Image (spheres, rainbow, N blue to C red):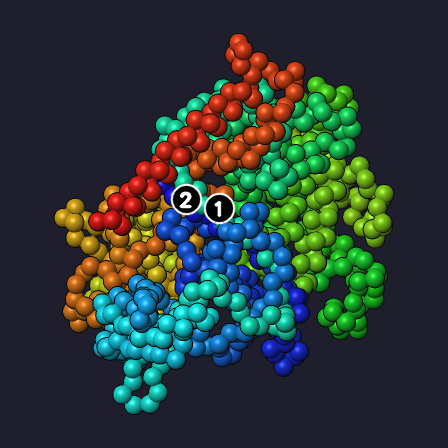
Amino acid sequence: MTKNTSLYFRIVEGRNLPAKDVTGASDPYCIVKVDNEVVARTATVWKNLNPFWGEEYTLHLPMGFHSLSFHVMDEDTIGHDDVIGKITLAKDAIGSQAKGLDSWVNLTRVDPDEEVQGEIHLCLELLKDAEKASVRCKVIEARDLAPRDISGTSDPFARFIFNNHSAETSIIKKTRFPHWDETLELDLDPEELHEDGTITVEVWDWDMVGKNDFLGKIKYRYINKYIYNEYKDGKLGALRLKVRLIEDHILPSVYYQPLIHLLVESVNSSALTLLEEVTTVESRQDVAMTLVKIYLGQGLVVPFLDYLNTREVQHTTDPNTLFRSNSLASKAMEQFMKAVGMPYLHEVLKPIINRIFDEKKYIELDPCKINLNRRRISFKGAMSEEEVRDSSVEMLQDYLSSITESITGSVAQCPPVMRVTFKQLHKRVEEQFTEPENEYLAISGFFFLRFFAPAILTPKLFQLREQHADTRTSRTLLLLAKVQLSVGNLGLQLGQGKEQWMEPLHPIIRLSVAKVKDFLDKLIDIDHDIVSELPQRAVFTSSVTVKEGYLHKFKTEGPQLLSRFAFKKRYFWLTSETLTYAKTPDWQVRSSIPIQCVCAVERVDENAFQQQNVMQLITQNNDRQLHIIYIQCKNVNELNQWMSAIRKVSIYNECMLPSFHPGTHRSGKWTCCLQADRTGCSRTHSVTLGDWSDPLDPDVETQTIFKQLIQGRDKLRSVDKTFLEVVLPGMSAAARLLAVIEDLERAHATFQRRENENDASVITN
């Protein structure tokens, strides 16, 4: 049985942030850390004290974590970025919320001395008898401490403090990975243990001249387990966060087969209906995504979606409300389009989105929002309101024409499995509603209202851009998204809303609708059997490029260069089998690294090359010799994305290393620990970012469905038996599901008992 830890967080927005610039504003962004590792950086929102980010991330953390922190920064083009404040959430605090955290949280002050890094290994013990009391601390080792000396290392020692008593370890010279293995004991008066006691272990860098430098500390209050921050007044502003922690024990695959078999067998029966009955509104999106992955892996996603869509259509009386709710069918279709259609979306929209961002044109149609001062003054003087509106209409028509042409000309690029799914949907709507418009509405609703329009409105959230749009571009995108909504509704509601100032665009909307109908006819003109001949996205295939782009590779050949000249620009391609690079995408001479040789991919200390965002790829040749390739990314997000992608494709490699050196090897020793040994001084990581391109993991996905069924077990038992389809003599679908649930529960209990017995055996020995 393995442990699976997933951490989901969404940084929604900030409010009432303090002004850090002379203009009375700030340029805020967030740095997100799991323990001491930076896992994400949001885009910067310029000149805004109430920024909206809306960025969400899912992290897979096989080794667990201790805390999640959000640092709000003010970006400065000159000098260092200013720290505004931070929020730190302990793992226990996140896990105690069954439905996760979803609230505003006040920022707290940041003490530069508290912004430390590293880990310390301790054993604490309170000793008490009738005559005396003492507290004992065995300080074993520390790792990944901050470098405080110009050599890139430190001279650390530890100080053990209890109330007014203290003791210190010896000093270990020139290392960030000290090993003490010393026991410190403090004699106490017995009554001291009746007071509120705080145990503190501090780590310092010893300096021969001047003050010692603080490296970090840990506190443990033995009466109250949790330590609360003293700053709670909200003077530094607040962040609205959504955070959810999921920890599961995953059984071996064989135990999930009965549930998989029941789901696969019941694509067209009532087991899915029962699952929808017990699914809560809050969990529906997660369940929908999980089911989509399961049926993708089984090659049955088309009949699965067809079953849900058929039920939705049959239970809808008004075609105008079709798929407008947050039903399982609606959510499943949304998640399906993201799972299989994101590369297609990028191919269709990215060129025009890039053009809009680059041109930064001022476009406005609403008379209440037109600002004549925002337009450049021509040689003939300032433009009138009518001229601004006419110019805006012309530019919007140009953009809309480009978007429409790109979409309607993309039949061949659209994934066949999407086309067949839409064909089935068209057929079900046609059977239920006779008006021709309704047949198009269902498909266009998903295609435009839930896929293209949201991507146009917020390109950053669909990975079409690295940054959020500025105010001017954001308004242009909003107007274009409004038009896509009208196109998705086939122009049926034109002129009925309050925004009558959109009327100049009605002719091009009607023209777009005609083209869209023709496009949809071609889109669903596909042989249904073609899908069975195509490989489903169950795992990464060698023919699929998982990630590609320009990076900088460290040049190790020839004479040693200065660090900033030693990284050469190269174009990289990553598949499930190789990491390939060349001078340019068209360059014929290419070098390849087999993925099966990858042993680890990790960050490199900044002081190793005096460069940021450098990762190291550790590989092993046929002679089991290790080789390291250093690659620099342009920012921390790109660094995390590449590390995550390489870790995903190499996750099953047998040669993975348990440890690594975060520094570089120079003059016969490593810069991080000053040792010559190739054995790493820091444990390797396996944090990966969850996204639409993830390979499928049937065991984890089936465990998610099992948990949902457990929560709805009472409801399953109370379902009216007359509603159930009898799939076996004397046994209803609900009864079969309940039997499978009970079997899985027993398996979990058995494995948990074995783990507890093993843990007890280790402690005894």
Q: Is residue 154 visible?
A: no
Residue denoted by label 1: 246
Residue denoted by label 2: 4
151 up-or-down from 441: above or below? below
Q: Position of residue 709 (x, y in %)?
A: 54, 31
Q: Earlier in the sequence, mark 1 or mark 2?
A: 2
Horizontally, residue 88 falls left or right of residue 603, namely right
Residue depicted at x 63% and y 72% = 233
The amino acid type, in three-letter code, at marker 2 is Asn
Q: Give yes or no for contact between labels 1 and 2 (Cβ–Cβ under 8 Å).
A: yes
Where does the N terminus fall, quadrant-wise? top left
Q: Position of residue 619 (x, y in %)?
A: 24, 52
Q: Please, which residue is most extreme toward the bottom here?
A: 209
The amino acid type, in three-letter code, at marker 1 is Ile
Secondary structure at numbered mark 2:
strand
Horizontally, residue 319 falls left or right of residue 588, namely right
Secondary structure at numbered mark 1:
strand
Residue nearest the observer in this picture, 477 or 681: 681
Horizontally, residue 560 falls left or right of residue 469, namely left
How far is the residue under mark 1 from the one under mark 2?
8 Å
Q: Residues within 10 Å of mark 1 (few under 14, many from 20)?
A: some
197 up-or-down from 590: above or below? below
Horizontally, residue 623 falls left or right of residue 548, namely left
Residue nearest the observer in this picture, 758 or 279: 758
192 up-or-down from 370: above or below? below
Residue depicted at x 73% and y 59% = 363
Q: Residues within 10 Å of mark 2 (few under 14, many from 20)?
A: some
Residue depicted at x 79% and y 71% = 382
Residue depicted at x 79% and y 69% = 372
Which of the 4 image quarters holds residue 74?
bottom right
